[in-house]
Image: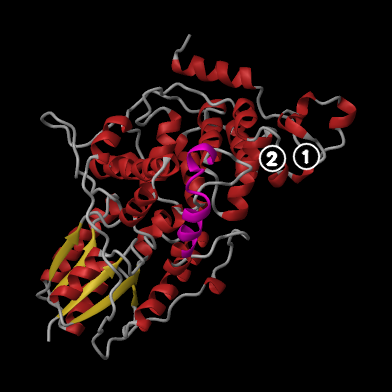
Amino acid sequence: MTVAIVLFTSDLRLHDHPPLHSALASADEVVPLFVLDDGVGAAGFATPNRRAFLADCLRDLDAGLRERGGRLILREGEAAEEAARVASEAGADSLHVAAGVSAYAQRREERLREALASVGSRLSVHDAVGTAVAPGGVVPSGAGRDHFAVFTPYFRRWSGEGLRSPFRAPRAVRVPQGLGSAALPSRAGVRGLSPGLAEGGETEGRRLFAAWRRQGLAAYEDRHDDLAGDATSRLSPHLHFGTLSPTELVHRARAAGGPGAEAFVRQVCWRDFHHQVLAARPAASRSDYRPRQDRWRTGRSAEEDTAAWKEGRTGYPVVDAAMRQLLHEGWMHNRGRLLTASFLAKTLYVDWRTGARHFLELLVDGDIANNQLNWQWVAGTGTDSRPNRVLNPVTQARRYDPEGAYVRRWVPELAGISGPAVHEPWKLPERERARYDYPEPVVALPEGLARFKEARGLD
């Protein structure tokens, strides 16, 4: 009787799961294993919003396995040590795991290989589980170039790749008898959640995508930047936790066809792009991808401005609306992420790492590759070919929330201001302005722009 282990990490699903498919094909019995590893830290699943979403995902994964005659084995501790212990208990000769791109994932793979070898088991690492195209699957021409630093040429090459066909969910999973398991965590046991946090799990992810594919995909190209319309897919948490397969999403979107599907696939490619950058440059999670001589603001004034930004009290309604959405939902509209990041890093001139850490503390989809590299893109230290562009929050608000509905939804103290005037409450007559409990802008936009240009030596 042969036994294989599948170590689930950020791939908490049964559909289109290459490690599970390979393990079932090569062994008589399979151990579906997840290790609650505190070493992952805040960058993984350790923050309240992600712990709660993870609890949903693990319970749904266990339920899906039980429908197929199996169950999820949950252990707590260091991943490699626990995996080797389970391999020894079950007599497993192999362990299958998805490849990761973060520095932590790369260290985990090294430790797994060593720990498994010590108990006579081998490690099998599978690519293109968390991405549609594996990091390093396409590289630029020329010696010594190990990744694409510009999105457009990457997208061209990525689009020409033939993606594998998605695997069906297994009909049966036979798990060895007698293996102990820790109790599954529950969302109810997590404190400090965002009150509007979405539900996790593969079942919910597949339901969400099916509904959005029917109702929202066709209009995605025209509406994905519409703040008030909330017309994005909201699938990013499910992609981060791997309850949905990016490969399957690309196949199903392309099957639907049309400009909306093409725009959606492009966004999936952006995610792959950031993963291949981080796989090649793991230090970019904490250091400038393109080093600059930025002298970010520090001191009390910068700390007060940052606190106002975190609380949604900057005096710029669209910035504050997006930051309050983050606090309430543990999620933020993509256009909101861009303009709030630009406001902190360029208008307030505060180190991008400060903002990236705050996002990781709250975002249920807080992914090292996408969070850190999107922050660097906006801050001008990453892959943006126009590193000194500054997003004007008023201009952005007029363009993407023209009637102010998004602002009034999240900044209710301004709900009495009708139309686009809500984006510039400081321009209201003083008597009317006094009616609203809302702060004055922390900085005038021309002042912030002048400070940024001076700091970067721009004319």
Q: Residue at x 32, y 33 (%)?
A: 151
**Magenta region, residue range:** 207-223
Indicate the position of residue 355 as horizontal and vertical percent values: 50, 40
Q: Examine the rendering and report whether any part of residue 436 can be seen.
A: yes
Q: How far apart are the two marked residues, 2 and 1, measured between alpha carbons?
A: 8 Å
Residue 344: name its quadrant.
Answer: top right
Q: Residue at x 44, y 61 (%)?
A: 46
- Image side of residue 199 versus residue 36, left or right: right
In the rendering, at what x and y percent does residue 85 appear?
A: 22, 78
User: What element does badge 1 sit on?
Assistant: helix
91 and 235: which is toward the camera: 235
Q: Residue tagged by mark 2?
A: 407
Dot 2 or dot 1: first in sequence order is 2
Q: How many marks?
A: 2
Q: How is the image coloured?
A: secondary structure
Q: Amino acid at mark 1?
A: Leu
| Viewer-proximal residue among 253 and 258 | 258
Q: Which quadrant holds the N terminus? A: bottom left
| Prevailing secondary structure class for the magenta stretch in the rendered image | helix
Residue positioned most to the right: 431
Q: Residue furthest bottom?
A: 178
Density class for disc 2 (Cα within 10 Å; few <14, some 14-19, many ≥20) is many
Q: Nearer the viewer, residue 108 or 241?
A: 241
Examine the rendered structure and indicate whether residue 160 appears above or below residue 26.
above
Based on the picture, tell me whether residue 403 belongs to the magenta stretch.
Answer: no
Up-down relation of residue 337 to residue 8 (above or below): above
Q: Look at the numbered disc 2 and give the secondary structure of its residue.
A: helix
Q: Residue at x 57, y 28 (%)?
A: 348
What residue does disc 1 label?
414
Label 2–label 1 contact, CB within 8 A = yes
